[in-house]
């Protein structure tokens, strides 16, 4: 019989086909008073079951998750799928205009019109017949929050930069979010039709953020576009297709569907609605679907043009109706075989969520982060830095970049000017970083998010304090050096066998001194035979702390007996010296 982590006495009795009273009687013999509804742990349950003659197999509660996201697909089952693209960039650089232009171009190319914007994801068919899925993400923070939940939603990021405005704080933030999600970037230099447009300036400014475009000898594609005049849109879409070919995006459509919930909401008259992006398999009407702690039977699938559809394959975004509660954006969904399995998984997740909420805030202190880094063996120190002016931020950036050595270094996940926002906290939570504020403060939403996600925020007003704190924290990650100090040598003259003690070596100290409790090496013919510690050091019959050169003494090793006449005992001390940067 199987026993989970915790089980009620009633359930245990049912599984053993015994009366609950018999188990309560058995427990009373051991002095424990229980009701039939009481919960007992798996150890107690195992003892009871074995006493009643059953063979027990222990299972963990977490086993219900096994097989939720199915096995990897065989290479021969995979077929090419459409790339999933997210458009990011600074405010007023033309993201929405570009989306609308692409959408309008799509309508012109004889696609069904009237695309509903609220779905937040839609497919475009380019003249070559290739499909591209666009995701209209609500800001960079949501983009990284999805990444934080383990859902790599997007394959490619299009970074929109205005040719007349250049690289701005949100552009830098978008670059950092894209790097954190480890996805390739295509640069769309927008507004080239404006009089003050200078695309070359954009290319040069991107260099300082480690983005080298193709025209400057790098490997990041860049396209000059105008959303207003619809210039070069086809070239941008072709660039996406080219990048997708390099990535070799494939999926198996002939399997139960799984993917990511991009957006979710409660709608009057329709109930909980989730926008799902299918990543593998095909989602069909009537499937039983689980997303986070929500589940349901798919009652309706609505595609990006507002039409009802019977199924959705890989890279296809659809609105799903039929959930019991609204899932969260970024939750992974999968089709399960029956309702019982769906309930089992969602109930387990709900319990785990309550536990997590109870221990929230235990992740992000600097000290805990150091311990985590030590355990992981990673010697990178991730930081998100926000300052009041660009000059201070650059000075902090330069100072922290110089800290570190071969073993440990600071990794600046994001550096920016202005107050600490919810987006910064989201990025820090994803990358496991600590947020440092220099003469700036976190707003109320950011403080709430930091408390919820357990991200530590530290405030500084003096650069030297900030750098010293980081130097101390990073020094804690350096492994200490082991330093040996030679104490002395002793030669074994004779070995005595003493009952209840074992072998004791009669020695003469030839140089230096020998101390009790020090580290020793046994050397025979200039070869180290054993390394350990002294258990006894005697002079005549008395235990002594140390014996100096020229005197004789008796020595015994801890847990080692193979000593011979003529061996040399080398005595030394070991100290661990904490290194600093």
Image (tube, rainbow, N blue to C red):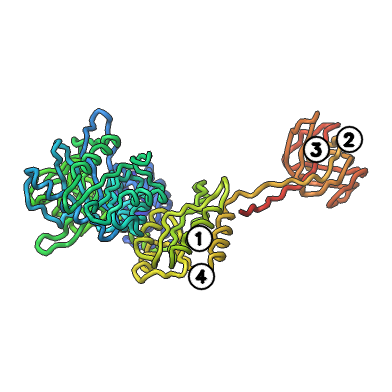
Q: Which mark is residue 503?
A: 3
Which residue is rendered at x = 17% and y = 44% of the image? 316
Q: Earlier in the sequence, mark 1 or mark 2?
A: 1
What is the secondary structure assignment of the residue under circle 3? strand
Of labels 3 and 4, the one closer to you: 4
Res. 9 visible in picture:
no
Mark 1 and mark 3 lie on one chain; the one further toward the N terminus is: 1
The reply to whether discs 3 and 4 touch (Cβ–Cβ < 8 Å) is no
- Measured in 3D between alpha carbons, the distance from the residue under mark 4 to the one under mark 2, in whole angstroms, is 68 Å
Residue 461's disc is 4
Label ID, residue 493: 2
Of all residues, the one furthest to the right in this rendering is: 550
Question: Could you tell me which secondary element the residue under label 2 belongs to?
Answer: strand
Return the x and y of residue 234 as percentages of the image width and height.
18, 42
**CB under 8 Å between callouts 2 and 3?**
no
Between disc 1 and disc 3, the foreground one is 1
Which percent across, then down, holds residue 190? 25, 52
Mark 4 surroundings: few (<14), some (14-19) or many (≥20) residues within 10 A = few
> Marks 3 and 1: in contact by CB < 8 Å?
no
């Amino acid at each position: 019989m199987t026993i989970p982590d915790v089980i009620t006495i009633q359930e245990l009795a049912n599984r053993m086909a015994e009366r609950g009273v018999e188990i309560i009687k058995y427990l009373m013999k051991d002095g424990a008073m229980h009701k039939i509804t009481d919960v007992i742990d798996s150890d107690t349950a195992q003892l009871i079951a074995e006493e009643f003659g059953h063979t027990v197999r222990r299972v963990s509660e977490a086993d219900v998750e096994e097989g939720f996201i199915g096995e990897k697909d065989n290479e021969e089952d995979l077929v090419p799928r459409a790339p999933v693209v997210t458009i990011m960039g600074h405010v007023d650089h033309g993201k929405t205009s570009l989306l609308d232009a692409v959408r309008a171009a799509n309508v012109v190319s004889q696609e069904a019109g009237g695309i509903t914007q609220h779905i937040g994801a839609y497919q475009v068919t380019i003249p070559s017949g290739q499909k591209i899925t666009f995701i209209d993400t609500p800001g960079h923070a949501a983009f990284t929050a999805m990444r934080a939940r383990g859902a790599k939603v997007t394959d490619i990021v299009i970074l929109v930069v205005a040719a007349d405005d250049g690289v701005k704080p949100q552009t830098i933030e978008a670059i950092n979010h894209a790097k954190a999600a480890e996805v390739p970037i295509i640069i769309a230099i927008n507004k080239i039709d404006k009089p003050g447009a200078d695309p070359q300036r954009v290319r040069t400014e991107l260099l300082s953020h480690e983005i080298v475009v193709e025209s400057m000898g790098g490997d990041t594609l860049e396209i000059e576009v105008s959303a207003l005049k619809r210039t070069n849109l086809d070239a941008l879409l072709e660039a996406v297709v080219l990048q997708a070919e390099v990535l070799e995006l494939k999926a198996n459509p002939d399997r139960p569907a799984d993917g990511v919930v991009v957006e979710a909401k409660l709608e009057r008259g329709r109930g909980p609605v989730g926008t799902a992006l299918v990543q593998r398999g095909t989602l069909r009407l009537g499937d039983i679907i689980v997303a986070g702690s929500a589940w349901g039977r798919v009652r309706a699938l609505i595609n990006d043009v507002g039409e009802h559809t019977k199924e959705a394959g890989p890279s296809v975004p659809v609105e799903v109706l039929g959930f019991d509660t609204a899932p969260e954006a970024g939750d992974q969904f999968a089709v399960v075989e029956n309702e019982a399995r769906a309930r089992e998984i969602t109930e387990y997740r709900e319990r785990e969520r309550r536990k997590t909420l109870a221990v929230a805030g235990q992740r992000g202190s600097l000290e805990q982060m150091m311990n985590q880094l030590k355990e992981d063996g990673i010697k990178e120190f991730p930081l998100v830095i926000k300052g009041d002016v660009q000059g201070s931020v650059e000075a902090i950036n330069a100072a922290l970049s110089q800290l570190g050595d071969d073993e440990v270094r600071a990794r600046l996940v994001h550096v920016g000017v202005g107050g600490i926002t919810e987006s910064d906290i989201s990025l820090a939570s994803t990358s496991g970083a600590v947020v440092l504020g220099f003469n700036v403060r976190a707003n109320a939403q950011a403080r709430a998010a930091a408390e919820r996600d357990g991200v530590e925020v530290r405030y500084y007003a003096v650069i030297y304090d900030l750098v010293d704190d980081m130097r101390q924290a990073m020094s804690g990650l350096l492994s200490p050096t082991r330093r040996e100090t030679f104490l002395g040598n002793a030669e074994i003259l004779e070995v005595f066998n003493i009952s209840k003690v074992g072998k004791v070596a009669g020695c003469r100290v030839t140089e230096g001194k020998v101390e009790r409790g020090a580290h020793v090496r046994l050397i025979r013919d200039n070869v180290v035979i054993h390394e350990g510690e002294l258990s006894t050091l005697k002079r005549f019959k008395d235990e002594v702390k140390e014996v100096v050169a020229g005197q004789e003494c008796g020595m015994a090793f801890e847990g080692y007996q193979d000593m011979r006449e003529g061996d040399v005992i080398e005595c030394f001390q070991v100290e661990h010296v904490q290194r600093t940067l």
